[in-house]
Image (cartoon, rainbow, N blue to C red):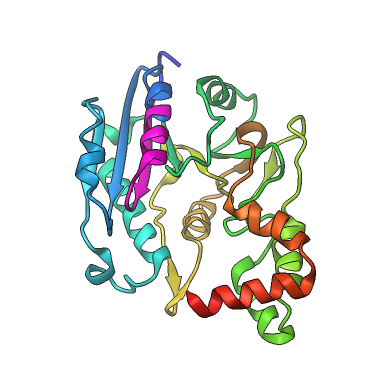
Amino acid sequence: MKNKSIIFSTVTRSPGKKFIKSINQFLKIAQKFKKYKIIIVESDSSNSPEKIFAEFKDSNIIIKRLGKLTSLIPNGHLRTERIAHSRNHYLNLIFNSEELSSYDYLIAFDSDGVSEKMDYDSIREALSINQQWDAQFPNQILAYYDIYALRCNNWVDYDCIMKKNNLIKESNNPKKAFKDCITSKMIKIDKKSKLIKVQSAFGGLGLYKIKSIGNAKYKGSINNIPICEHVTFHKEMNKSNRLLFINPAFINSLGLNEHVLIGKILTLLPTPIFNFLYNFRKKIT
């Protein structure tokens, strides 16, 4: 993609070794494009991020520190609102800049190591598909895991966390609620399958045509209830009839992470044990 320009953006809190590895991974990819920037937005860290940031010498890396958003923004006690605010910050940086807003692509990525298999060839092939698109989201080898950010006809059309919590209140059976609302929806997608049209998805990263984002913004809560910020962002994009897809061949990871651990592995435990562990964890957090 020697003739294309790209921006990689991420948000972070208390960055560590996985963060450093992720940034270096995407920096290596970015350097194969004609022009690139990496935007890092940090907030609410409990460590000393400046020591981590000092490791990055590339002048195309932009670092913005927002301080303690918990006390600076409305509903700052909600993680989803802090993330949404940070994501909106990098969008503002892009669209308030004549240079950055003219770039071709944006990849918004999680910097906690969940895209360990992503490389330049994967992105090049995604950009080269012979089909109209505005955003693409990756697939995982074991199973597509990001049910929270997913909205797709005949698959998931609800907030899985909200529905899961409501089922637990009704049935007092956390394992069944997890399986019904989350685990059963983590399906394996053959990488040779056709593009899957979605209203929203993520799965560790999103590949966007910058011109297709328009005025879309992230929002992390409704009536003080946390919601997935990706869903609201993509809902705004969909108002302009954008084409959003999960690309089955666009593999970013094995898919073995904390989401799959809870959703696919821990639910293999006998129901009494799973429910005991779930209720015990709720009491101490």
Residue 166 horizontal/vertical position (percent): 65, 80
Residue farthest along the bottom direction in this orientation: 170
Vertical placement of residue 197 versus 154, above or below: above
Q: What range of the chain is rendered magenta?
A: 7-25
Q: Is residue 44 left or right of residue 246?
A: left
Q: Is residue 56 magenta?
A: no
> Is any atom of residue 163 visible in this view?
no
Q: Is residue 106 left or right of residue 162?
A: left
Residue in view at x 73 percent, y 71 percent: 273
Q: Is residue 18 magenta?
A: yes
Q: Nearer the viewer, residue 74 or 144?
A: 144
Q: How many marks?
A: 0
Vertical placement of residue 93 versus 29, above or below: below
Q: Is residue 224 left or right of residue 75?
A: right
Quarter occupied by the N terminus: top left
Q: Nearer the viewer, residue 176 or 156?
A: 176
Q: Is residue 103 left or right of residue 52?
A: right
Vertical placement of residue 160 versus 169, above or below: above
> Is any atom of residue 17 visible in this view?
yes
Residue in view at x 45 percent, y 41 percent: 109
Residue in view at x 57 percent, y 30 percent: 117
Q: Nearer the viewer, residue 161 or 260?
A: 260
Residue 122 horizontal/vertical position (percent): 57, 24
Q: Quadrant of residue 23?
A: top left
Residue 34 horizontal/vertical position (percent): 35, 17
